[in-house]
Every structure is written in C-alpha cells, then in structure tokens.
Amino acid sequence: MQITVQKNRFKKRVSTEKILLISSIYYQKLMKTIATYLSIILISGLSFVANGQNVPEREKVLLTSISYDWNNSLWGLHSYRVYEYNDNDQVVSIFRYHNYNGDFSLTDKTMYEYYEDFDSLKSVICYNPNVIGGYTYHFSYYYDDSLRLIQENYIINFPDPGIKYIYTYEYDEYKLIKAYGYLAYLDPAYLKSYKIYYYNSDNRFSGYLFYVLNDTVWIKSDSAFYKYDTNGYVIKKEYFNRNVNEWQNEWLREYSYNDNYTEWEEVLLKWKDTAWSNEIKTLKWFDEEGYVTKMIRMDWNDSIWENLDKEVYFYGVLGDDEIKSVPKVLNIYPNPCAGKFNIEINNKNSAKETISVINISGQEVLQIVNTESKINTVDISDLSAGLYIIKMTEGNNCYLGKVIKQ
C-alpha cells in the first residue's frame, strides 16, 4: 500500500512499508501499529492512492470523520476527527475526540509541518494530553534535491531527548529499492535491518524481502508479494515469515471491486495449520470522484461475518480566500443545545445556502434550503439527543460543523 500526497505543488509518494524496520518482535509489532495509524491519518487528512491506482489531484479536502463501534445490534459513536488546513490546503492539525458515556473529550492531536521552499512534509508530531510529557511520537522527514524521501527519524515519547530510530532510503531513479533501519538510541547507531523492494514489468510495487541482523549474521525475516488487476488495482497481498530455513504462510489480503471501482472489499485471512482462515473483512465505498465516503470492518465469527466498527467521511471545498479552520467557518451556538441552535456563517458571500443536519449514521434528518441570512435558527427538538453534523453548502463550497443536543 502506498500513500500519494497530491496537494498543489506537493506530489510525493511515500511507502507505508518503510517504517516496519525494527528487528525485535516487540518493536516490529509496535511499528506496524504506528504505521497503520499514520497511514490512516495521511490517507484521511491529505489524499491517497487507492491500492495502486493514482487518484487525480482534486480540490476537496476531508473536514470531519466519525467512527462507530458495533454493540449488539446498534452502532455506537466511538470518536470523531476534525481537520484543519493551511493556505495551501495542506492538513496542519487533526483533532481526535473520544466518546466517554456521551461526553466528548480531546484524546490526541496530530500536527503536520512542511518545508516552506518545496511544500514537502517536514514532521509529524502526535500530542496526547493524557500522556506524561504530552507527546507520543515524532517523525522527521528529509529529502534529496529530487524531493525523494531519503531519511526519517523517529522519537517515541517525544520530547524525550535523543532520536530512537533512523530509516534511510535508496532509489534507482525514482523507484525505492532499499530501506535501512538503524537503532539510533545505541551509541554509535548501527544497522539492524534492511528491506529490498521489487517491481513488476509495469513498474508497480510487487513485493519486498526483509532482513534482520542476528548477532553477526543477516537472516531473512519476512517477505510479501503483490498482484494487480488489468486496471492497476491490487487484488492480492500475500505475506510470509521465515522460520529457520523454511518460508511459512502468515496472512493473505484479497481485494475485489465493483465495475466502476466505487465499492472495494478486502478480506484478511490468517494461515492456520494447513489452510487459510477468515479474520477481518473491510468494505469501502467511494463517490464518483474517488473519495472514500464510508468504511465498515467485520469480524469472522465461526461461519458468519459480524460488524466490528465503521467510519464515515465528510468533505468540503476550501476556496483561496476562505478560512481553513472548520470551526471558524460555522459558528454554532448554544452548543450543546436543548433543541434550538443558531448558525452564524462567517465570510458569507451573496450565494444562497443549504443547511443539512446529519445524524451519526450519516443520514440527513433535516434540511433548510435557499437561506440568505447570516444567522439561521435551526430547531431539532424532535430529534433524539446526541451528536449531529451540520453541513452548509454555499455555491461550490461545503463546510461542516457539529452540535450536541442534550
């Protein structure tokens, strides 16, 4: 899987495989978890490549995403994220709020910094107010003259002094061919692992071979192979572990799509004894422009798939002269409300607006059309208590806010 950041002048491909370079089993699992979380953030907050197929550069950006957990027969609100952007439409902050018995509180904030001269990602810092010191990790990125990522430094429990891990990358023209992992907390830092990348005849990533240092001997640790359909979409990812001198199946991901690639399915299978066994199914839906609108994960329970969790995504278009921070676009008060609340629209132009109220299932439950007022009063007295997304469409622009009904 790869991430392509395509915002204005910044077009750089970064492999999510690159940060899985730590030798010990514990740190491999740790880094895989972080890699997954970071890739979700980048995919959601910036722009992405859908399993090998480039998504054209567009103007819409992700404003809010809402996560749900499946509990018996109902979806329960788990958390939501709010995204903020700079004047170049690059995400600069992602705020994540968790639901604790109906009370939402900020649990983490991820901050992005860019190089001013070429708009490339400079650092990613995750802030957690519940952690001593306030920070959980910090990535720093460095590029060569061709804007290829050549080094990444990683600090856990930042700002704890000292770089913990260093990853460097080697290219053949513009293809990543090798990645090296150094244990930087040792003095001097030394090479502990490396990964070789392979490509097919279409120059698509086809797999890797991962080596770790065991005392003084390099051994093969794991490998993966990718297959694509005729349109360049991934249809299979197969992973293997090396046990002594034998390769063993570890897990398999199979992908399928509908005819117009607006629906996507991934099935994760784990190797158990002599056969593949279902584990997790992930379903994604895309709009006609290629934006993911909903994702549902399901868990295999004996003979059936059962809902596990869900995420819904909301997008908008940010104009050059508009405020990039979503909360400053729609001023919603009182919030929480007992039944009625006001929406004050900042930077209002002469266009008419449509205001929609959306419940946590993504359904529109109320709509006000052709309003021209700067301040509108919305009555949701007949709706159940809980969180609602407020969507305001003004011409070609779309803005989101939120309100909680008590």
Image (cartoon, rainbow, N blue to C red):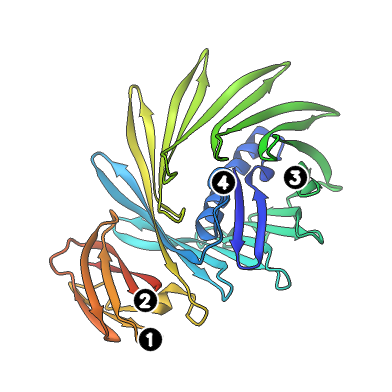
Discs 3/1, front: 1
The residue tagged 4 is 53
Separation of residues labelled 4 and 2 (CA atoms): 30 Å
Give the mark nearer the N terminus: 4 vs 2.
4
**Disc 1 marks which residue?**
349
Amino acid residing under circle 4: Gln
Rendering coords of residue 339 (x, y %)? 17, 72
- Judged by depth in the image, the label closer to the viewer, 2 or 1, is 2
Figure quadrant of residue 181: top right
Q: Amino acid at mark 1?
A: Asn
Q: Provide residue 391's location: percent of width, then percent of height.
A: 32, 69
* In the depicted structure, whether residue 160 falls above or below residue 114: above
Quadrant of the rendering where the C terminus is positioned: bottom left
Question: Mark 3 is on which residue type?
Answer: Leu
Q: Return the residue at label 3.
A: 176
Quadrant of residue 233 within the rendered picture: top right
Query: Answer yes or no: do the residues labelled 2 and 1 have beta carbons within 8 Å?
Result: yes
Kindly identify the residue that appears in the image at 68 percent across and 68 percent down: 119
Q: Secondary structure at mark 1?
A: loop
| Residue in view at x 64 percent, y 67 percent | 113
Q: Nearer the viewer, mark 2 or mark 3?
A: 2
271 versus 59 height, above or below: above
Please state which of residues 372 and 269 is positioned toward the viewer in this rendering.
Answer: 372
Give the x, y percent position of residue 404.
Answer: 27, 67
The crowd level at tag 1 (other Cα within 10 Å; few <14, some 14-19, many 20+) is few
Which numbered disc flags the more N-terminal residue, 3 or 1? 3
Residue shown at 48% from the left, 26% from the top: 269
**In which quadrant of the rendered image does the N terminus lie?**
top right
Callout 2, which amino acid?
Answer: Gly
